[in-house]
Amino acid sequence: MELLSKRLAGLSESQTMAMNQKTQDLQAQGVDVVNLSVGEPDFFTPDHVKAAAKEAVDKNFSFYSPGDGYADLRKAVVAKFKNENGLEYTPQQVIVSNGAKHSLANAVMSVVDEGDEVIVPAPYWVTYVELVKLAGGVNVVLRTTLATDYKVTPAQMEAAITPKTKAFLLCSPSNPTGSVYSKAELEAIANVIAKHPRIIIIADEIYEHINFAGKHESIAQFDTVKDRTVVINGVSKCYAMTGYRIGYLAAPLWLAKACSKLQSQFTSGPSSIAQRAALKALTTESSFTEDMKEVFKRRRNLVLQGLSEIPELKFNVPQGAFYVFPDVSAYFGKSDGETVVRNSADLSLYLLSKGYVATVSGDGFGEPNCIRISYATADEKLSKAMASMKAAFAKLK
Ligand code: PMP
Ligand code: GLU
């Protein structure tokens, strides 16, 4: 529509959200689809957190919160960073937002100018490149492969940096590949960026607690880059609170202040009720996240087993998050006699229409040879989905 701003004209819809919607529409029509598209825990929010939300309603937390979030919640986030990550921040350096997606948007909008280059390793989470476009920036996409477990190398970074580079977007554990950067790998990347004082690191650590490899490592731990790193996190994934919409960032003070200003004009503080619930989640000892992680690990193994029974798929063994990202390109050009599968978008649609399994095509993640499978769903549904996928792939000749 020609009346739309140029900014919006170039923006793509979130493919994860779109596929989820399509699946839910089909389900509403009575079609029995297993939804492996959207990435959100299928667990219910823990009871003590739900109780805190109800209590907040009763205690009249119905007024605007401070624009950056309640002071006690920001203090709880500071304590989380100190206790879990060994990172020191003041509450002024923490901004609470409407989900980690909003925190990312604040960070990108605050540092990226028209024409600035942003380095984004692919496969990337769908939203990154769209936010950069919205800010007028230029995505410098670094393709990674199975050979490096889909991780970017210091040499690739070095070669991609130009005088226009303004930011670097890093996701570990990664959506969509589940790759987890080790401390040594992060240090090597930090050492490259340390030589370029105009580059801001935006580190998305939303899957911090869904890490099967061991302890989470943050790139912000390296003094060489800490004062240029924004750490993004939130309660959506680790406490199964996606609908509450609470995320946060910690950043150097000048950048936190910019995000605060932006947020004060764009959204004001996030939901008061959800913030009280997030405070409870962050300040209560509970085995919830750990237990959930164990379940995800079991489900990951179930999906990997299923995929290994489908010939010619190539995939890494994800060490975190709740996705598997198989390379399905061996099937491009094949047909079940009715539908020709030319690319990953076709394959994803084929699996939906013929196998009744919803996945997301790799295009939106910058890797058109793959599809994304979210295994944040019940074991029985996963087993059913893997069996129908196996049958659907077998029909492609
Ligand atoms: N980053 C990544 C990598 C994600 O997968 C998600 C999930 N949507 C987010 C950020 C945003 O999370 P939130 O629900 O807190 O906005
Ligand atoms: N993180 C989830 C996903 O990638 C949620 C969807 C979204 O926010 O785009 O599927």
Image: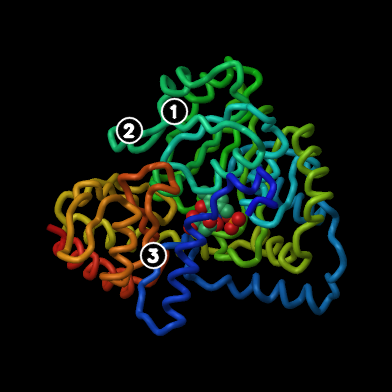
The mark lying in front, picked from 1 and 2, is 2
- Left or right: 316 in relation to 195: left
In the rendered image, which quarter is residue 306 located in?
bottom left
The mark lying in front, picked from 1 and 3, is 3
- Left or right: 66 in relation to 116: right
Residue 42 drawn above or below residue 32: above
**Distance from mark 2 CB to nearest ligand 1 atom below 8 Å:** no
Mark pair 1, 3: CA separation: 33 Å
**Amino acid on which the number 3 mark rests in the picture:** Leu
Mark pair 1, 2: CA separation: 14 Å
**Amino acid on which the number 2 mark rests in the picture:** Thr
Q: Earlier in the sequence, mark 1 or mark 3?
A: 3
**Distance from mark 1 CB to nearest ligand 1 atom below 8 Å:** no
Residue that carries the numbered disc 1 in the rendered image: 184
- Percent from the top left, x then y, of residue 282? 65, 58
The mark lying in front, picked from 3 and 2, is 3
Q: Residue at x 20, y 50 (%)?
A: 333
Q: Earlier in the sequence, mark 1 or mark 2?
A: 2
Q: Residue at x 75, y 59 (%)?
A: 270
The secondary element bearing badge 3 is classed as loop
The secondary element bearing badge 1 is classed as helix
Residue that carries the numbered disc 3 in the rendered image: 36
Disc sitting over residue 148 in the figure? 2
- Left or right: 397 in relation to 209: left
**Amino acid on which the number 1 mark rests in the picture:** Ala
Q: For the N terminus, which image quadrant?
A: bottom right
